[in-house]
Image (cartoon, helix red, strand yellow):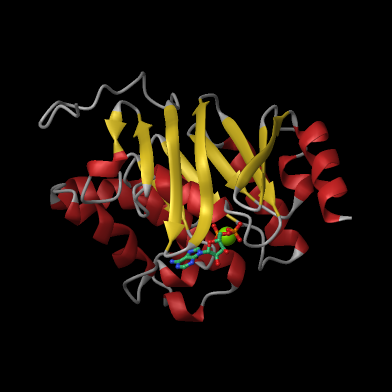
Amino acid sequence: MRGFGTPPMKNARNDLDIRFEGAGVSFGTRVALQPLTLGISGKRIGVIGLNGSGKTTFARLINGLTKPSVGRVIVNGRDMSGEKTAASDVGFIFQSPQNQIILPIVRDDIAFGLKRRGFTKAEIEAKVEGVLARFGAEALADRRAHELSGGELQMAALCSVLATGPSILILDEPTNQLDLKNRALVEKIIAGLPESAIVITHDLELIAGFERVLLFHEGRLAADAPAAEAIARYREIAA
Ligand SMILES: Nc1ncnc2c1ncn2[C@@H]1O[C@H](COP(=O)(O)OP(=O)(O)O)[C@@H](O)[C@H]1O
Ligand SMILES: [Mg+2]
């Protein structure tokens, strides 16, 4: 039984502990994700697969944005199926970051998530400056989000999400809309993140060094292997 009011049993910070226990998702009669049982720990997990294979559904289960139709998803000791809000220790960068920037000015958007978490004004200011400095993104602070380029937008979204101090970051196709220069920048940022990261991508180079890559096919986990092996299997499927 889920212990209502039980504090989350959080691991040492930045340690990833995710368990899928027969968790599956259907939308009406369409099965987006077949019941899946697996554990995820470690620093870097890649997720690949054809369009519509269930990657985003898998990721949304982790932060509770999507609830399992069957089974459970436990994140750092917390059963996400029963949580009303998205997990605060799971940061999620959406496929289209323009959809997650809520306020017109970057600085205000970063502050917004912090305000909702009840930080004081001084704490918010320090955290906003801190995250901008961490990514060398100070120049974005007073820019209008709708005027930013794809790479700048990705950076602003990263700042907003990481300012709140999640232990896990999920990036859904983070290099999709980026030119080579911004892609390289995002790759470098991902490599340097102390946070655990789950990277969903069609950009196979981005996950080429990962020790663990999950391949989804038609809503099923088709491979759970080091990058080279999962990518080889993916090429077979796509051929
Ligand atoms: N909210 C939804 N309503 C109905 N069908 C959905 C919804 N979200 C996803 N799906 C379906 O579930 C399947 C998996 O989608 P998704 O997880 O977004 O795939 P991917 O991220 O791998 O492209 C697709 O067939 C998609 O159309
Ligand atoms: Mg997707």
Please count the marks in the image.
0
Residue at 13% from the left image edge and 48% from the top image edge: 120
Residue placed farthest to the bottom in the image?
A: 147
Position of residue 117 measured from the top left corner of the image (x, y, whole percent): 18, 49
Q: In this view, does 79 lie to the left or right of 16?
A: left
Position of residue 187 measured from the top left corner of the image (x, y, whole percent): 67, 47
Residue placed farthest to the left in the image?
A: 5
Residue at 39% from the left image edge and 34% from the top image edge: 167
Quarter of image, res 108? bottom left
Quadrant of the snapshot with the C terminus: bottom right
Residue 56 visible: yes
Residue placed farthest to the top in the image?
A: 12
Query: With respect to residue 2, does 217 lie above or below?
Result: below
Please state which of residues 99 and 144 is positioned toward the viewer in this rendering.
Answer: 99
Q: Is residue 103 left or right of residue 162?
A: left
Q: In this view, does 151 lie to the left or right of 137?
A: right
Residue at 38% from the left image edge and 67% from the top image edge: 106
Position of residue 9 measured from the top left corner of the image (x, y, whole percent): 26, 21
Query: With respect to residue 197, does 172 lie above or below?
Result: below
Quadrant of the snapshot with the N terminus: top left
Residue 136 visible: no
